[in-house]
Amino acid sequence: EEQCLPEPKLLLFNSVFPLSIILLILIIMALMAAKVSQLRLMVCERFFTSAGNARVEYLHRKILQKRSRARKKKSEI
């Protein structure tokens, strides 16, 4: 019975190379996603400047609020 069972063979070409190609593609896609999001923000800023200015003001207010909360916590201690 033991002679009928085939011996498993793990070939390097059949396992490592396809996995490395998939990993390389995933890394490239991750880098492209970051660049595409930057490009999207640049295009939106170019064509919709009022929305970009509103976003800047919103983010500035948010940063100032976080700083004021941090100062209040430090003064309470």
Image (cartoon, rainbow, N blue to C red):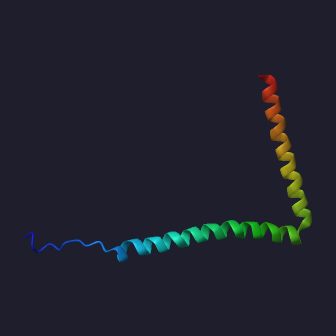
Camera-nearest residue between 16 and 48: 16
Q: Is residue 73 above or below residue 50?
A: above
Please give left or right for residue 32 compared with residue 48 in the image: left
Q: Is residue 47 above or below residue 67?
A: below
| Residue at far top of view | 77
Q: How many marks?
A: 0
Camera-nearest residue between 40 and 34: 34
Residue 16 drawn at (x, y percent): 40, 71
Q: Give residue 14's quadrant in the image.
A: bottom left
Task: Give the residue drawn at x 66%, y 68%.
Answer: 33
Residue 46 drawn at (x, y percent): 87, 71
| Residue at far left of view | 1
| Residue at far bottom of view | 13
Task: Give the residue drawn at x 82%, y 29%.
Answer: 72
Q: Give residue 4's quadrant in the image.
A: bottom left
Q: Quadrant of the C terminus?
A: top right
Q: Quadrant of the N terminus?
A: bottom left
Please give left or right for residue 6 compared with residue 16 in the image: left
Q: Is residue 48 above or below residue 55?
A: below
Task: Give the residue drawn at x 83%, y 51%.
Answer: 59
Please give left or right for residue 2 compared with residue 76 in the image: left
Task: Give the residue drawn at x 77%, y 69%.
Answer: 40
Residue 36 drawn at (x, y percent): 71, 70
Camera-nearest residue between 28 and 50: 28
